[in-house]
């Protein structure tokens, strides 16, 4: 069995591919030193289990005797969490497992950029995954996490793009502009809660209505529609050069941005694929193209 771990700046994503080809997906906030990495691995990453497609099996925990066969963990690291420490914590519970850390050299995609070795591995994995799914078709890939990356991929080549601050990072700017401006969230409840908390199904979002009638709503409009407008501008710009351009959305805030982008752009040209980066990891592992994953509630 193969498991992809995508270690981002804010979240840790786990994507499981079972021997019969079915998949399962879950995500948590990055464990902090305070909460303890070992306790997170034992109490959450392994013990919560994964949803299987076999009616008799149900949830399959990954710790103890419940899942004896060796697992290969394919790890991509872009955030600050030390993947080697995570490996050590998993190894304590599952000493027979194998671990593979992906590098730039593992991602076999052409790059038309100045310094290929400096491109974020998550951006390359998303591009590789998109090519694995759609071949040489022109695509604009938007990965909306702590940062929002907007990258052009066409003719099976990564051409680079733009990096914007993520929605959460942008929201923190307003109180710095003036103490009279509040810190706002686009979500009715905080999307990222105290670790370890799942967020994959927590898109409790209301589309901001313009014009905003108070400071909080005005900030939400600038924050949200400014970001949607920037992405839509890049799309329109590139669509003038590449026919049948497709926008692929992934990342923690993808579902949130999907609502506005479906207003600003033709919905039929937009694809929401939450597991895009993880699918790229699994494709490199040699499993090949995988189907839509099941979002787990843990």
Image: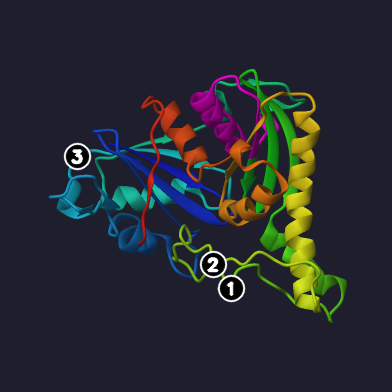
State which quadrant residue 5 falls in: top left
- Eye-nearest disc, 2 or 3: 2
State which quadrant residue 172 falls in: bottom right
Secondary element at tag 1:
loop
Q: Quadrant of the C terminus?
A: bottom left
Q: Which residue is mark 1?
A: 188
Q: In the image as oriented, which residue stretches furthest toward the right? A: 178
Q: Choose the circle earlier in sequence order: 2 or 3.
A: 3
Q: Choose the circle earlier in sequence order: 1 or 2.
A: 1
Q: Position of residue 288 (x, y in %)?
A: 39, 25
| Residue visible at 53% across and 53% down in the picture | 81
Q: Residues within 10 Å of mark 1 (few under 14, many from 20)?
A: few
Q: Quadrant of the N terminus?
A: top left
242 or 89, which is in the foreground? Answer: 242
In the image: residue 298, left or right of residue 216: left
Magenta residues span 117-141
Q: Which residue is mark 3?
A: 69
Q: Choose the circle earlier in sequence order: 3 or 1.
A: 3
State yes or no: discs 1 and 2 in contact (Cβ < 8 Å).
yes
| Residue visible at 68% across and 51% down in the picture | 263
Q: Position of residue 54 (x, y in %)?
A: 18, 45
Q: Which residue is mark 2?
A: 204
Q: Residues within 10 Å of mark 3 (few under 14, many from 20)?
A: few
State which quadrant residue 126 falls in: top right
Q: Is residue 93 above or below residue 207?
A: above
């Amino acid at each position: 069995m193969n498991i992809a771990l995508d270690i981002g700046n804010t979240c840790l994503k786990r994507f499981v591919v079972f021997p019969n080809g079915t998949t399962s997906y879950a995500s948590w906030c990055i464990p902090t030193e305070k909460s303890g990495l070992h306790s997170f691995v034992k109490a959450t990453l392994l013990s919560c289990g994964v949803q299987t497609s076999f009616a008799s099996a149900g949830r399959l925990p990954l710790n103890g005797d419940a899942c004896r066969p060796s697992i290969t963990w394919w790890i991509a690291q872009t955030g600050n969490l030390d993947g080697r420490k995570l490996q050590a914590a998993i190894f304590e519970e599952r000493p027979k497992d194998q671990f593979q850390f992906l590098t730039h050299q593992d991602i076999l995609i052409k790059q038309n950029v100045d310094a290929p070795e400096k491109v974020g591995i998550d951006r390359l994995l998303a591009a590789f995954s998109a090519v694995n799914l759609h071949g040489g078709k022109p695509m604009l890939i938007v990965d909306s996490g702590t940062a929002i990356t907007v990258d052009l991929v066409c003719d099976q080549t990564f051409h680079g793009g733009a990096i914007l601050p993520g929605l959460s990072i942008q929201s923190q700017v307003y109180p710095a502009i003036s103490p009279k401006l509040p810190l706002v969230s686009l979500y009715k409840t905080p999307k990222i809660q105290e670790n370890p908390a799942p967020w994959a199904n927590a898109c409790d979002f209301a589309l901001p209505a313009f014009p905003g009638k108070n400071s909080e709503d005005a900030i939400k409009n600038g924050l949200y529609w400014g970001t949607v407008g920037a992405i839509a501008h890049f799309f329109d710009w590139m669509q003038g050069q590449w026919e049948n351009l497709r926008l692929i959305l992934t990342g923690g805030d993808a579902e949130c941005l999907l609502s506005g982008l479906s207003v600003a752009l033709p919905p039929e040209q937009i694809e929401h694929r939450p597991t895009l980066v993880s699918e790229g990891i699994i494709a490199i592992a040699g499993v090949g193209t995988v189907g839509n994953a099941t979002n787990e509630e843990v």
